[in-house]
Image: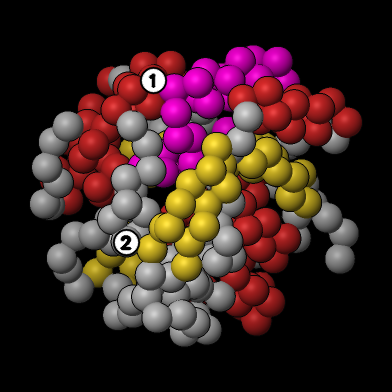
Amino acid sequence: MKLKSKILVIAGSDSSGGAGIQGDIKTITSLGCYAMTAITAITSQNTTGVLSISKVPINEIKRQIEFTSKDIRPDAIKIGMLHSKKVIETVINSLKEIKVKKIILDPVMVAKGGTKLVDDKSIEIIKTKLMNRVSLITPNIPEAEILAKIKIKTTDDMIIAGKKLLSFGAKNVLIKGGHLKAKYVYDLYLNKGEKEFFKSKKIKTKNTHGTGCTLSSAIATYFSCGKTLKKSCKMAIDYVNHSIGSGPNYGKGHGPINHISVFNIKNKFK
């Protein structure tokens, strides 16, 4: 199979393999593209939670992004965990240098087990300096609540929050609705000219570790291959749902999904 595009992932690692850089690489590779990485932090974690987070030196983050891109130019970039103000500023400066247009930002703020992964200064700079530089931001409901500073209990609340994110400078928003108590999952795609909910049946399982990382990487992958951003979101949601439904049931906590499920269902993604 010929590789279709090249994706640079800027994110933290996950030693348990389900989320972070490891989940991103699995996703991009499974969808037939080439993954490159710039690691922002090293986490020690498993399906039950995060034990520790070790910082990567700022200069090494900069070198990973710029030196890699100088040799193999990415067709798209996916940004995940950025744990400090200095890291975010470094990433912004590097984005200016490499000038890649297709950028997906997954504002990773809270781990599945509830551990907070970023500080308040980081959240503010994401809102004021990074959000307006990317093609799409993909918060889940807790992250959208933090960014928009409102409680989200209904799909109408999701729309209000999405519009607030647009007012902060976001070009396109995908708010993931999995945290709402409902029979179905409603994911909201929103920009200044479009509003659409993607409806999916909710799969009853605790094994959803890495779904956010996987979704944003899948969107970046489809987007890099020439799909529209809206179509990329829909295809990525379908991919994640199939991966959740065929999860391997590993670990004692929130287990990983099955990133290679696409090998059995690839005809559905044409």
Q: Which part of the image, by quadrant, shows the C terminus?
A: bottom right
- Assign a secondary structure to mark 1: helix
**Can residue 259 be seen in the rendering of this structure?**
yes
* In front: label 2 or label 1: 2
Cα gap from disc 2 to disc 1, whole angstroms: 25 Å
Q: Is residue 214 magenta?
A: no
The residue under the point 33% across, 32% down is: 119
The quadrant in which residue 64 appears is: top right
Choose between 229 and 241: the one closer to the eye.
Answer: 241
Choose between 14 and 72: the one closer to the eye.
Answer: 14
Q: Is residue 90 left or right of residue 161?
A: right
The quadrant in which residue 62 appears is: top right
**Can residue 194 be seen in the rendering of this structure?**
no
The residue under the point 85% across, 35% down is: 72
Mark 2, Cα crowd under 10 Å, few <14 / some 14-19 / many 20+, is few
Q: How many marks?
A: 2
Q: Position of residue 13 (x, y in %)?
A: 58, 51
Choose between 134 and 116: the one closer to the eye.
Answer: 116
The residue under the point 53% across, 26% down is: 87
Residue picked out by circle 1: 125
Residue picked out by circle 2: 113
Q: Is residue 83 left or right of residue 24?
A: left
- Assign a secondary structure to mark 2: loop
Q: In this rendering, is residue 1 above or below 190? A: below
Q: Is residue 84 magenta?
A: yes
The residue under the point 44% across, 75% down is: 255
Q: Amino acid at mark 1?
A: Ile
Q: Which residues are magenta?
A: 81-109
Q: Amino acid at mark 2?
A: Gly
Q: Position of residue 31 (x, y in %)?
A: 69, 62
Q: In this rendering, is residue 53 above or below 1? A: above
Q: Position of residue 50 (x, y in %)?
A: 41, 58
